[in-house]
Image (cartoon, rainbow, N blue to C red):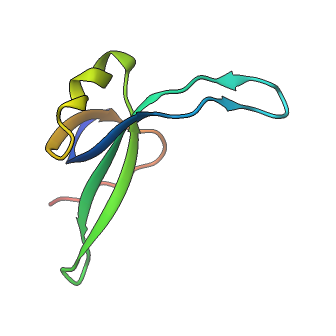
Amino acid sequence: MKLTLRAKLLNVYNSNEYKDKDTGKVTKSKPKLQLLTVKTMKDGSKKNELLDVSIPKEKFLSYKDKIGKEVEVDVAVIGDVVFYGV
């Protein structure tokens, strides 16, 4: 399933490499977007949520000049998701 996430872009960065201390397997760094979303709560108040989203390396540079702006990011879902109408 493919979705589009719309949020304010705060930063673009590369995550750190990770080495599993049991297996020694190294997971390479990934380019990521740091996004700010606003969630409306049941009582109508607003809650800011910070999301770190991995993106393909070839898309990394296309976001660098959009920091501080609202962006749309094509995303896929990992795990269970509950949908509701808005």
Residue 4 seen anywhere in this rendered image of the structure? yes
Q: Residue at x 26, y 56 (%)?
A: 37
Q: Quadrant of the C terminus?
A: bottom left
Q: Residue at x 29, y 66 (%)?
A: 48
Left or right of 51 in this view: 68: left
| Above or below, 72 relative to 35 | above
| Above or below, 10 relative to 46 | above
Q: Could you say which is closer to the camera, residue 12 or residue 86? A: 12
- List the single residue furthest toward the right: 22
Q: Which image quadrant is residue 42 in?
A: bottom left
Residue 59: x and y, percent? 29, 21
Residue 2 seen anywhere in this rendered image of the structure? no
Left or right of 81 in this view: 70: left
- List the single residue furthest toward the bottom: 43
Left or right of 81 in this view: 39: left
Q: Which image quadrant is residue 1 in?
A: top left
| Above or below, 65 relative to 71 | above
What is the count of numbered marks? Answer: 0
Q: Residue at x 32, y 24 (%)?
A: 60
Left or right of 43 in this view: 70: left
Q: Could you say which is closer to the camera, residue 6 or residue 58? A: 58
Residue 9: x and y, percent? 24, 44
Residue 39: x and y, percent? 25, 65
